[in-house]
Image: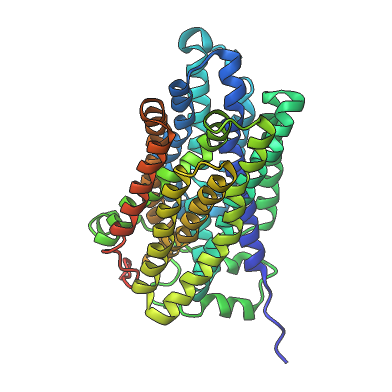
Amino acid sequence: MNPHPTRIRWRIVALLMAITALTYVDRMNMGIAGKYIQDEFTLNTQTMGWILSAFALGYALFQVPGGWLGDRFGPRSVLTVAILWWSAFTAATALAPWLPLRRWVGIVGCFLLVRFLIGVGEAAAFPNSNQIIGFWVGSSRRGVANSIFLMGIGVGGGCTPLLIASSMQRWGWQSSFYICGAIGAALAILWHRYATSHPEQHPRVNAQELEIIRAGIPPSNGEVGAPNIPRPSPPWRKLLSNVSTWGLMLSYFCEGYPNYIFYFWFFLYLVRARGMALSQGGLWGAMPFLTVVLLAPLGGWFSDFAVARLGKRRGRQATAWTGMTCSALLLTLGAHTAANWLAVVLLSGALGFNIFATSTWWATCNDLSRNFCGSLSALMNMCGNLGGWVSPILTAYIATHFGWARALDFAALVTFAAVLLWIPINADQNLEA
C-alpha cells in the first residue's frame, strides 16, 4: 500500500504568504507614519509623495538583479538574505531623521535613502517566491499557489492600518519600525531552517508528492536550476524579443499604478480628504486588504478553472480581463460616491479585483518559463513597480491640483489599459523551447 503524498509544498507556499505579508507591512507602515512625520517635520503632501515613492524606485530597479540572483544561486538563500536586509533598514527608518547624513542631505534625504534601501531588499521577494512556486507546484495548480502567496498582500495590508496605527498612537511612530524589523529577523531564520529551493532537497517530501509536483511538466531539458546541475544564464534576448514578455511588462505597469494608491495614500486619503478620525482611518483603511484575502484565492481558482476549460492563453486572458475591468469600474464609482462607507466598500472592491487578476500574471511567468521564471517575473515586476514609483508622485500632483476624484479617475483609466495590453499575451508559449 502506497503512503499518502506529503503536503510540504503547501507549507512552503504558506511561508511565502507570510513573507509577502511582511513585505506589505514594511512598505505600508510609512503610509500610516506619514501623518505623524508630516506633522512633526512640517512636510507637505508632495514631499511626502516623493518619500513614499522612494521605496518603489529601489524596488523596481533591483527586480532584475534580485530575480537573476535567485536563478543563479537558488531562491531559498537569496530570500533569506533579502528578508534580513529589508528588515534591518525597516528598523533604521525610525532613526532616519537623526542619521549623520542629515547634515548633508537633510531629513527628507535621509528618509528617501532608507526607503530606497528597503525597496532594494524587498525587490528579491516576489521573483524568488515565484521561482519557488515554479519548482514546487505542478502546472495545474499554479494559479491557486500564486494566489495563496498573494493573499499575503491582504493579510499584511489588513494588519497594517489596525496594528501599526495603534502602536504608533501608543508608543510613537518609531515603534512600529523596530517591531517590524524584529519580526523580519525571526521570519528569515524560520524560512532558512525549513525551506529548500527544490522539493528534491527537502527531507520530508516523499516520492508521491514529487510525482504530483512533476505532473504535466515536460522532462526535456531537466531542471536546469536543480541541485548539482550548472545554471546557465537566462535567455535574455529571447525573453526581450517576445511579444508576450512585453505584454506582461507593460500591463503590469498598469496593474501596479493603482495599487500603490492603496499601499501609500489610502489611509491619508481617508483622514485628510474624507475627514475621518485616525481611529476610523485605521479601521476603514484595512477593508481593501480584507477584500484581497477573499478575492485573491478566488482569482487563482478561477484562473486554473479557465485554463482547464479554455486553454492557457484564453484562460489566463479571461481572468485578467475580468478582474481588471471590475477594478476599473469600482475605482470610478468609489471616487464619485459621497457616502464614506459606500465609497470605502467600492474602492475596497477595486483593489480586491485587481489582486483577483494578479495571480494570473505570476502564473503566466511560470507557464512561459519554469526554469527562468525568476528573471522573467523580475522583468514584469520591475515594470509594475515603476508604475508604483510614478503613482504616489502623480497621485499627489493630481489630487493637489484637481482633487482626489480626478486622481482616482486617472487610476481607473490606467487600470483599464491593462485589459487591452493582455490581448497579445500567449501563455501557451514555451520560451525555453
* Residue 194 image-quadrant placement: bottom right
Farthest top residue in view = 103
Provide residue 182's location: percent of width, then percent of height.
71, 36
* Residue 89 image-quadrant placement: top right
Residue pictured at 33% horizontal, 47% vertical = 413
**Is residue 74 at all visible to an observer of this figure?**
no
Instruction: Name the quarter where the N terminus is drawn.
Output: bottom right
Q: Nearer the viewer, residue 129 or 307?
A: 307
Provide residue 418's location: percent of width, then percent of height.
34, 54
The answer to whether residue 417 is left or right of residue 265 is left
Residue pictured at 56% horizontal, 45% vertical = 344
Provide residue 305's location: percent of width, then percent of height.
48, 76
The answer to whether residue 129 is left or right of residue 205 is left
Farthest left residue in view = 241
**Is residue 134 at all visible to an observer of this figure?**
yes
Residue pictured at 48% horizontal, 33% vertical = 55
Q: Nearer the viewer, residue 281 or 8?
A: 281
Provide residue 88's location: percent of width, then percent of height.
62, 32
Farthest right residue in view = 170
Q: Nearer the viewer, residue 23 or 373?
A: 23
